[in-house]
Amino acid sequence: MEGVGGEGALAASPAAQWGHDAWRMYQYYLDKTTPHTIYRWIGSLVVAAIYCLRVYYVQGFYIVSYGLGIYLLNLLIGFLSPLVDPELEPSDGPLLPTKGSDEFKPFIRRLPEFKFWYSFTKAFCIAFFMTFFSMFDVPVFWPILLCYWIALFVLTMRRQIAHMIKYKYIPVNIGKQKYGGKKSYAGSSGSRGD
């Protein structure tokens, strides 16, 4: 008798090692996709289109689609929101500039783009997997769910846009910021003519 974890630990070790190796390989390839934003989103849109085609051809699983839509709306709100909400909690860390004289502070998202993409793709994969089980095909009148989701989207986005206007931030990067200071160099006579 070797004690606790003797032979049982050795028998479980190859399976645990295989699972750990598979997870490391998955994480390695996931990390390699980080700089390829456009290709990641194209792949995710292909996954979303496959899910939509599956729901269309099966003519069901509308409640799964509704839950997916609510989850994606929640992800979008996290993606568009600042890390520190000036309305809720005053912080000693970086805040959004509120005046033109404030120094530039970059917009830090509550949900970074990579995590947004990963959760988006994972949600579509899980929803696609759920369409193969009839217990998730709850009979509902889908136009009501669609109207309710559109109303929820409009109200939520209106609130989010009002928050963005109130605290003067734009959650998208539109190229490199350029300084628009004095342009006296163009109007001055800087020619060294004779």
Image (tube, rainbow, N blue to C red):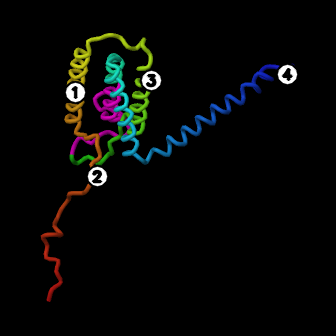
How many callouts does the rendering have? 4
Q: Which residue lies furthest to the bottom in this view?
A: 194
Q: Nearer the viewer, mark 4 or mark 1?
A: 4
Give the distance between the C-alpha atoms of the residues marked 4 and 3, in whole angstroms: 44 Å
The quadrant of the picture occupied by the C terminus is bottom left
Image spot of residue 8 (x, y percent): 76, 21
Give the distance between the C-alpha atoms of the residues marked 1 and 3, in whole angstroms: 33 Å
Q: What residue type is labelled 2?
A: Gly
Q: What residue type is labelled 4?
A: Glu
Q: Label 2 belongs to which residue? A: 175
Q: Helix, strand, or loop for circle 2?
A: loop
Mark 2 or mark 4: whose residue is earlier in sequence: 4
Q: Residue furthest front?
A: 57
Residue lying at 37% horizontally and 34% vertically, measured from the top left: 110
Residue lying at 25% horizontally and 56% vertically, measured from the top left: 178
The quadrant of the picture occupied by the N terminus is top right
Q: Label 3 belongs to which residue? A: 129
Is residue 149 depicted above or below 188 in this figure? above
- Cβ–Cβ under 8 Å for marks 2 and 4: no
Mark 1 or mark 3: whose residue is earlier in sequence: 3
Residue lying at 18% horizontally and 62% vertically, measured from the top left: 182
Give the distance between the C-alpha atoms of the residues marked 4 and 1, in whole angstroms: 64 Å
Q: Label 1 belongs to which residue? A: 159
Residue 15 in the figure: left or right of residue 45: right
> Quick one: label 2, few (<14), some, or many (20+) residues within 10 Å?
few
Q: Which of marks 2 and 3 is in front?
A: 3
